[in-house]
Image: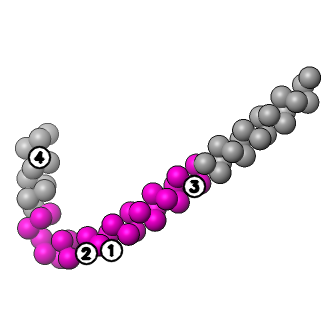
Amino acid sequence: IWLLLFILGVEVGGNSQIVSGLPVIGVEALIITAAAVIGSAVAAFLLWKRIAKNHDHEK
């Protein structure tokens, strides 16, 4: 596995189109990651509120 990762790194690093596009790829990855984290936090918050609401009705 280490050898395959090394070879992949060499191939990607040797490709000038990929290397020149890294800033764009990085920004897109950052946006996707931030959206996933925010979406997960909002979903967890809404689920927590719903569970707490149902728990209060049972008492």
Mark 1 crowd level (few <14, some 14–19, many ≥20, 10 Å Cα): few
Judged by depth in the image, the label closer to the viewer, 2 or 4, is 2
What residue is pinned by disc 3?
A: 38
Write down the region rendered in magenta. Answer: 12-40
Q: Amino acid at mark 1?
A: Val
What percent of the width, then of the height, locates residue 29? 38, 63
Q: Which residue is mark 4?
A: 4
Inspect the image, locate mark 2, and give the three-letter code of the amino acid beneath it. Answer: Gly
> In the rendered image, which quarter is residue 2 located in?
top left
> Residue sitting at 25 percent across and 75 percent down?
21
Q: Residue at x 12, y 71 (%)?
A: 15
Quarter of the picture holding the C terminus: top right
Tell me the element at label 2.
loop
Contact between marks 3 and 1 (CB within 8 A): the answer is no
Mark 2, Cα crowd under 10 Å, few <14 / some 14-19 / many 20+, is few
Depth check, mark 1 against mark 4: the one in front is 1
Q: Earlier in the sequence, mark 1 or mark 4?
A: 4
Q: Is residue 22 magenta?
A: yes
Give the numbered dot on residue 24: 1
Question: Residue 3, percent across and down?
Answer: 7, 44
x and y, in percent, of residue 41 in the image: 60, 48
- Give the vertical position of 58 relative to 27 (above or below): above
Alpha carbon distance from label 3 to label 1: 21 Å
Give the CA distance from mark 3 to mark 4. 34 Å
- With 39 as the anchor, is 58 left or right in this view? right
**CA distance for labels 2 and 4:** 23 Å
Q: Which residue in the structure is indicated by mark 2?
A: 21
N-term mark: 2 or 3: 2
Tell me the distance, in whole angstroms, between the alpha carbons under discs 1 and 4: 25 Å
Q: Is residue 26 magenta?
A: yes
Image coordinates for residue 30, horizontal then vertical, percent:
41, 63
